[in-house]
Amino acid sequence: MSVAKNIIRADVRALSAYHVPDASGFVKLDAMENPYTLPPQLQRQLGERLAAAALNRYPVPSYAGLKASIREHMGVPVGFDVVLGNGSDELISIVSVACAKPGAKVLAPVPGFVMYAMSAQFAGLEFVGVPLKADLSLDRDAMLAAVREHRPAITYLAYPNNPTGNLFDLDVMLEIIREVRDSGVVVVDEAYQPFAGTSFMPRLPEYPNVIVMRTVSKLGLAGIRLGYMSAAAELLAEFDKVRPPYNVNVLTEATAGFVLEHSAVLDEQAAELCAERANLAAALAAIPGLEVFPSAANFLLLRIARPGLTGTQVFERLLQRKVLVKNVGKMHALLENCLRVTVSTPAENALFLDALQSSLNT
Ligand SMILES: Cc1ncc(COP(=O)(O)O)c(C=O)c1O
């Protein structure tokens, strides 16, 4: 027997690593990144700020300055604090670990963000996926029945959802939150909030079992890895115990602090991407044999609906044309022949449309 076989859990050995394709030389439309960078003037100022960061010191563990700035700029309700994560991936992991009592369960609509199920597995929690309806809306009755049957410790509702891009019905979400009551937490994951025009954040004080989770990744700062979550103080205090003490490094802290002082730049970029989303959706809808789903995020889900042509074939033809999108067709039966594409600059969107038109034909 090898050391790995002796030591590593069988379910971990059976996993394949999270695959991130090499995108060099491609138009990269697979990961919902913001294509815009900071203006050169701000880049120079940021350079000076970073040069002054105390690289020789651990971060100040309270992160008080950055947290205050997030509370001020991100609409966190008065009296509420945030816990920071190395991306919201880490926050998902922290919530999973903190709630992993023996037999505890995690519930989420599927298809959804893959890390909900993976983090549950890593922490030894059972994952229960409840399929969305064919129109990709929440299956209210099935969700409420699943809450009653499984009494999940954690329920995830991504608002908007990934990979479908839609906003779930708020009234149904509230019914689910009420049904969970104090037997679990409901994570409202707002990774795509900058493009959604709505947020659960202002409602947080009404719901002591809700966590609102966000990330700066889609906003234009995917490289610095920073997520934050807000909830009742009693919950945050417990999650903070599980958080590794210096999980946000000083360069991330300094960058986020600086960019938040200039948050209007990111807001303008988000507004441009929303306008581009409308343009791209209209152009796609005009192509025969394509179904485009409504999106409140910075990506579009589309289905190849041409007899004799699969989503995978189109995905591979796009790759040959140096355009990388996400092939989500195998993720769930509801997504058969579907591709997910990030909304980008007018130039990159035009390249994608061109490559797609050609890929639908040959
Ligand atoms: C719904 C959702 N939540 C969380 C994340 C993770 O974001 P982060 O980059 O902060 O780890 C993603 C990333 O794609 C996502 O789609």
Image (tube, grey):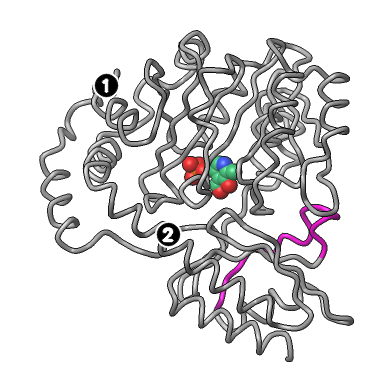
> Magenta residues?
323-336
Left or right, 102 with reference to 160? right
Left or right, 24 with reference to 248? right
Query: Quick one: label 1, few (<14), some, or many (20+) residues within 10 Å?
Result: few
Amino acid found under the numbered disc labelled 2: Asn
Instruction: Check the picture and name the quadrant holding the N terminus.
Output: top right
Residue at image position (41%, 18%) is 80
117 inside magenta stretch: no
Q: Do the residues labelled 1 and 2 touch (CB within 8 Å)?
A: no
Q: How far apart are marks 1 and 2 (CA)?
A: 27 Å
Q: Which residue lies furthest to the front in this view?
A: 171
Query: Quick one: label 2, few (<14), some, or many (20+) residues within 10 Å?
Result: many
Q: Give the residue pinned by disc 1.
A: 64
The secondary element bearing badge 1 is classed as helix
Tell me where residue 350 appears, x and y as whole percent: 51, 82
Numbered circle sitting on residue 179:
none
- Image quarter where ligand 1 lies: top right
Residue at image position (69%, 23%) is 177
Q: Give the residue pinned by disc 2.
A: 34
Residue at image position (54%, 24%) is 94
Residue at image position (69%, 74%) is 315
